[in-house]
Image (tube, rainbow, N blue to C red):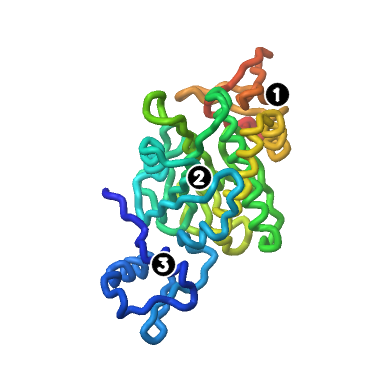
Amino acid sequence: MSPIALPGILTDLGHVGEAGLRLQDAPWFERELELCREWGFGLETVGDRVRLRPDPDALVPYWIQKETPALAWEWLRTHGFLSVDSTNREALDLARRGAPGGSLVWAEEQTAGKGRLGRDWFSPRKTGLYASLVVRPAREREHWPLLGHVAAVSLHDAISACVVGMAARRLDIDLKWPNDVLLGGRKCAGILLESLPAGEGAPAVVVGVGVDVHPGSVPEELEAEAVSVDEMAGRAVPRRLLLVTFLYHFQKGCRDFEAGDFVGILERWKARSSMWDGAPVWIHEGEHRRAAVTCGLDESGALLVRTEEGAPETVVAGDVRVRARDGR
């Protein structure tokens, strides 16, 4: 399925605000307005003008740029889609073509969203946050995995900040190694880091995030282990507010990364996680699993565990799940 780009008229409507645009001045964008209506953007016609209703959930390029401070890049470059196979794939293609750091790709839906270990990421229309950011690290490639920890801390803090004062109940938020954010013990967000292979352009990392925000973002068969932010907050949490807040925190973490504060990055991740030390876990290897207990992180962010036999191991990129009290 071919990507459907975000209609360019959304940028114009976001920029002009309440003044709107005169319909008679640009009859050529009627099809774009129709597409905006089909995808649920709030358009209003007042006299001979059309305008976009303010909406903190709407992913409108001008609003995202205006609300995102530039801390780690000169300015945020936005690439929005209504539908795309994978925002990570689009961001990697942009990076190959020389896109600078701070280039953001997002979509209202993904038809082939990507998770870790080759898994799919369920990405239905306008229910979740599906975004990928091009980063051009100045640090050595061996340190790049720590950007996953930066992203996890940033998502944790963004969700916390957006829900404070909104939640109808206490928010139980946790980080699961290496890339998940949990609410009430269930997954609400994940992170996927991919880098350009050597020889395919200047060094670049794409940081992809997927967040289950609104009802319908979690497939029925996964409701026992995944949950939307709205469900745990007890009310609707605006997607754009969540995205902009994440980008703010992520830029702060990127500055720490470029300054070489790798120990600080790991300490901040550990401060937000209950599983990095002393947690009973299963290490999944294909169809088999082994029991272990976590005992820290190494300097690269890999998980340290001790097996039932007492042997220490380092888990670099495996599938690790917390064991329930009943041993399951």
Crowdedness near tag 3: few (<14), some (14–19) or many (≥20) residues, C-alpha within 10 Å: some
Residue for point 62% across, 52% down: 159
Kind of residue indicated by mark 1? Cys
The numbered dot on residue 157 is none
Q: Position of residue 191 (x, y in %)?
A: 52, 40
The C terminus appears in which quarter of the rendering? top right
Q: Earlier in the sequence, mark 1 or mark 3?
A: 3
Q: Marks 2 and 3, Cα distance to the nearest angstrom?
A: 21 Å
Nearer the observer: mark 1 or 3; the answer is: 3
Q: Marks 1 and 3, Cα distance to the nearest angstrom?
A: 53 Å
Q: Is residue 109 above or below residue 252?
A: below
Crowdedness near tag 1: few (<14), some (14–19) or many (≥20) residues, C-alpha within 10 Å: some
Residue for point 62% across, 16% down: 313
Nearer the observer: mark 1 or 2; the answer is: 2
Q: Nearer the viewer, residue 41 or 10?
A: 10
Q: Which residue is mark 3?
A: 12
Q: Position of residue 323 (x, y in %)?
A: 62, 32
Corner quadrant of residue 202: top left
Q: Which residue is mark 1?
A: 295
Say if mark 1 contacts mark 2, CB within 8 Å: no
Q: Which residue is mark 2?
A: 102
Residue for point 34% across, 67% down: 38
